[in-house]
Image (tube, coloured by chain):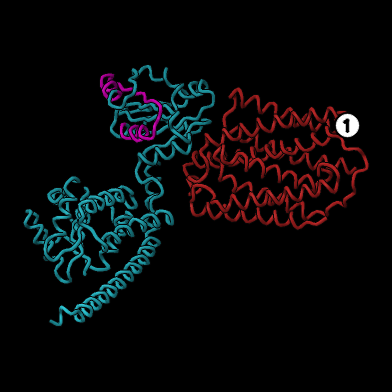
Amino acid sequence: MDRTALVASTLCFLAGFALSVQALRARAQGPSASTLWVTLGGFVLQTLWLYQRGQLLGRCPLTSLFDVLVFLGWSVALLYLGTGATYRLSLLGVFTSPLVFLLQSIALALPMPSVAKSVLPVNPWLELHAAVSVVAYGAFALAGIAGATLLVQERQLKTRKLHSFFYRFPPIHDLAAANRRLVYIGFALLTLGLVAGIFQGIAHVSFLRFVSLGVWVLYLFLSIALGWKRISPNRAAWLASGAFLVLLTTVWAVQLVGKS
Amino acid sequence: MELVCLGLSHRSAPVELRERFAIPETQQGALSIELATIPGLRESVVISTCNRVEFYAVAQPGLGFEALHAALAQRGMEASGDAFFRRSCDDVVRHLFRVVCGLDSMVLGETEILGQVKKAYSAAQEARATSKHLNKLFQRAFNVAKEVRTRTNITRGSVSVGSAAVELAERIFGKLSGCNVMILGAGEMGELTAGALQARGVRSIFVANRSHDRAVTLAQTMGGKAVRFEQWHEEFSEVDILIGSTAAPHFVLTRPQLEPLMARRRQRPLFCIDLAVPRDIDPEVNDLDGVYLYDIDSLQAIADQSMEERRGELVVCEALIQKHVQDFRAWLDSEAVRTEQALHSFERRAGDSPVHGV
């Protein structure tokens, strides 16, 4: 399958990263309009490639690690574009663009699995389960980024060593709010994905059941703790960042088990 | 046609002299037109702020300063001596550009001066004291100020303890409209900082002082609420920003005192600003989760750092200004050529006319 759209999309995110760093160095309040256009361009190209891939596969393009990484990048871009203005997190593009660039670069470095149109009937519950779960992972990725940014900001405040970029990132209160909202959004989507998984019978596969439930319970506790305001924003940030690392490990583990 | 500027500023004259020459805002337009109509001068703008009094004029070559001095002397303003500076031609352009960019201000990079110059120019324009040259000069100056602000960091950062505290509060809470402030002690610095926070729209201010009467007075001044000093911790769960400004010889707030109070705050952050010397707040509270403590030295260090960064931008600003001075010089030269050509053409036409031949 032709990779042109995917390569062009990856380059768009690289450009977005470069423009965001430039904005940061110039101490701009947020990314320039060109940064947003480049990110939007990258997202459109991602969507185009995923659509073509889906048409060839005859199902949601989530059949390999290659597809999962691209779909995860698409979810992160979608959430960034959707939440950026609302939560005043425009400068998170500084981290979003390199994250998507990294995800897609890893994908491009992998051999792309050959396209074999599925002969099995498409199970809508399975499609829903996979797609919604990956979008949830995207939300958790952004929550992790917001958390990491909050930790960096907090460390500067505590140590009273304020670098110039301290003034360019969102305030701690906004980062904590974004972290919380993204965890809630991700948790709601993950729950939906899990329910869809139960309907299509994935719950019978013991390892996947264990992983899915483990991740769900992890974010359930995090959501409850955030809702009850029992943990401080910086602990929530640590947990959101750590939980995302656990998620990445599970994606890899699921792929390994799938192959074996 | 010659551009001239006569004036004094905080760099050249003490406040006693500046206040003698200060011209009220309401009279600046009238004085501008008065100057513009005296022989030798064509256009004029008068700028008068607490840090400078400057007279800009377009004059016939060689007559500008003489005419300005005479006109001011008639008003009892003897503009002579070392305190007064004189600028002409490109130096006037450069000086005005530097002034509007805040490069000549007492606080480097301050932006208030731009508004003051805009008002002065507007008053002169309304009084019809300006024409082509000064209109072009001042409008260009405003564009230069905008460009310098956008392209450099000359206005960035907080250069006073109060503004540094306000900026830090905004980096923690975002908008301050939902924040409550408590002042412990009624010291002047605390009052000033609370005033700066109030200007940014904080929701409410509590004042606690050992002398309750003083707390009541200050609370009334600020539109806040006075709290008895012994009972300040009762209101504490609502407070987001705490300002220590007492004259107490020991810590008023310690970690063991704050820990149980923080537990009641449902993880809301607390910004402590300790402006007192000796300090009011035990430095150990900074180790608590969600507590950010800044004393007067750490705030001053931020202000100093910002000022240093502004100084570092001076070279870039001067280069930008120099480019615009050259552009303006090119415009002045082209105008001079155009005027001369128009004059020759007029003379030729006048020479060819039948009336001339009679």
Residue marked by disc 1:
A205
Asked if residue B210 lies in the magenta stretch, the reply is yes
Name the image quarter holding the N terminus of chain B.
Answer: bottom left
Instruction: Output the letter for the chain in cyan.
Output: B
- Residue at point 56%, 37% (across, down): A87
Write down the chain letter for disc 1: A
Q: Which residues are magenta?
A: B191-219
Would you place residue A239 above or below residue B13 in this image? above
Say how many tags the image has.
1
Q: Secondary structure at mark 1?
A: loop
Where on the picture, by quarter, is residue B90?
bottom left
Name the image quarter holding the C terminus of chain B.
Answer: bottom left
Residue type, numbered disc 1: Val
Would you place residue A131 above or below residue B19 in this image? above
- Residue at point 26%, 51% (across, down): B122
Instruction: Output the letter for the chain in red.
Output: A
Q: Is A111 placed left or right of B126 in the picture?
A: right
